[in-house]
Every structure is written in structure tokens, then in C-alpha cells.
Image: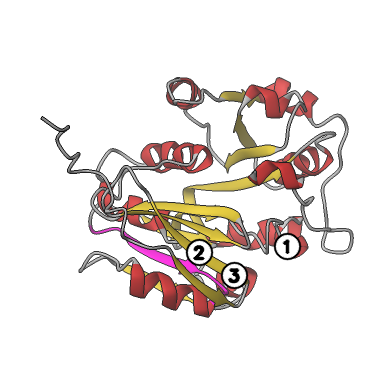
Amino acid sequence: MGKSKNPRRHDPAVAAVVEAVDGGLAELIPDRDRVRAWTLLIDGAPQSHVDLDDPACLSFEYQRRLGHVIDLVAPAGKPVQAVHLGGGALTLARYVAATRPRSTQQVVERDATLVQLVRRELPLERGARIRVRSVDAREGLAKVPDGWADLVIADVFSGARTPAHLTSTEFLDEVHRALRPGGWYAANLADGPPLAHLRGQIATAAARFPELALVADPTVLRGKRFGNAVLVAADHPLPIAELTRRAASDPHPGRVEHGRTLTDFTGGAVPVTDAAAVASPAPPASVFR
């Protein structure tokens, strides 16, 4: 007898969807192991993974770490008000909607053509309270009412680089304004040796928030390879022990740095202002091979 067909596997006849969007060439690649799951690439750089049957499934390492932050913002299942700067395939907004029903969310994604593609090919669940604005991230953030958000997540890349105007103290002033007392800020940062961008971003956040934590692969923190790090910031003490436990239990375990150790990690880096801001470094071509 032949092997039984795995009902969770994508039909091999399902083709990728490839379209030009404002930010480059978008590809939606079917996940061969999950029936209604897709990976979004822009100009060959992986951006998001979405499982329409299980939106609580987070496959990308950095998205899992942002998922841990979402889980800890409020008691399990409690609705929150979240702002997502950078939409991609709306993976994290879907995660919030699935794990915290009745949450109200705003997504700011500048690439209107990408938003149309994602809405058409990867439709949101009916009733999801997710509003998408197709404007620049900082412009969209400025429209968020004072003290509205329980959580602001920054995951913005133009190509594979974070735009300069989203790396400054002035940008974080806008983030801080939009957060309610007790709110959280989380950012997906990408850097490689010598980690100058990452150190500068920690110093910048420390100039505006008294409590910080950084979650990353230990090899990234040691400057051994290019990769992602998730920065978490707030005006209140963070649940470091629980964040550490969750990060350590991931398929690719992450390390959490905080307090004096994180301050020392900055190596004397100074906060970044609008006048001095530059985009994050471009990843080496080998990262996406």
C-alpha cells in the first residue's frame, strides 16, 4: 500500500503568487507542509509567514518573540488596543485577533499595493477589528490619539532596512505619546557585526523609556552573524523572568538581556536624533540564501 496523504500538506499544484508592489516584487510562496499557509517575500527577503487555518501559529523566530510580548501585555485573552507599524502579511495583527478576541488594532503599512494583494490572497477573518492605513509609519502613528495604545509594535522595513526616521528619539516621542500609562513598545531590529545600529537603538530607547529588555539569538548578541533582535520598552517593570522562560523555550532559543548587562552592551553608544539618523544596515546577500 502507498503512504497515506498528509491532510495538512499543501497541494503541490498550488502555485506561488508573484506581483509587483510599491516596495518591489512580492511573492506569496505556499508552505508545502501546511494547507493554507504562505510565506511573503519582498525582493527575495522573507517578510512574513501566515497560516490562515491557525493564525496563532508564528513560524518566524522574531515573530515568535514579538508574540511572547503580545502574550504578556495583559492577562491572557484580554482584548487590547494595538498599533502595528509595518504590516507585511498582517501576521501579528492576526495573532492578536486570534489570541485576544475583540481587540482593536490599527496597522500602518505604506505599501498600498501590498495591502491589496494580502487582503485578496490572505483575507482576514470576518469580524477582525483591524484597520489598515496605507501611509508612512510615522505619519500614521501621528494620527493615533494620545494614550490610545496598550502596545505599539514597530516592524518596518524598506527593502531589508529600517528607514532612518523610525530610529530616532523624536520617533520614540511619538510612540510614547500614543501609549497609555502601562503600555508597551516592541521593535524588530536587524543588525550584524559590529552591532553599531543595535547598540544605538538601545541607547535611543533608554533615553525615552526607563525599562528595557532585548531578546535575540546569542550568536547575534555576540556579533557572530546578522540577525533580528526584539527590543521591548516600557515605563513600568517588565516581566523579565517570564519573558526569559518563553524565549528559552523557543525552537531557536533566545537570550534576554536587561538592566546593567544591557546598558553595558551599548558600549557607550549615544541616542540617535532625527538629525543624525540613518537606515539600519543592509543584510549580507548570504542571509537569504
Please name the colour scheme applied to the rendered image. secondary structure
| Label 2: how many Cα within 10 Å (few below 14, some 14–19, many 20+) | many
Which amino acid type is shown beneath numbered disc 3?
Leu
Q: Is residue 109 magenta?
A: yes
Quadrant assignment, res 29: bottom left
The kind of secondary structure element at disc 2 is strand
Magenta region? 102-111
Residue labelled with disc 2: 27
Position of 267 with respect to 155 (left or right) is right
Please name which of the two marks, 1 or 3, marks the residue nearer to the observer.
Answer: 3
Q: Position of residue 178 (x, y in %)?
A: 53, 62
Say which residue appears at 43% left-offset and 21% top-offset. 249
- The one nearer the camera, 147 or 40, is 40
Residue labelled with disc 3: 25
Q: Is residue 159 magenta?
A: no
| Label 1: how many Cα within 10 Å (few below 14, some 14–19, many 20+) | some
Residue labelled with disc 1: 163
| Label 3: how many Cα within 10 Å (few below 14, some 14–19, many 20+) | some
Q: Are marks 3 and 2 in contact (CB under 8 Å)?
A: yes
Which amino acid type is shown beneath numbered disc 2?
Glu
Quadrant assignment, res 22: bottom right
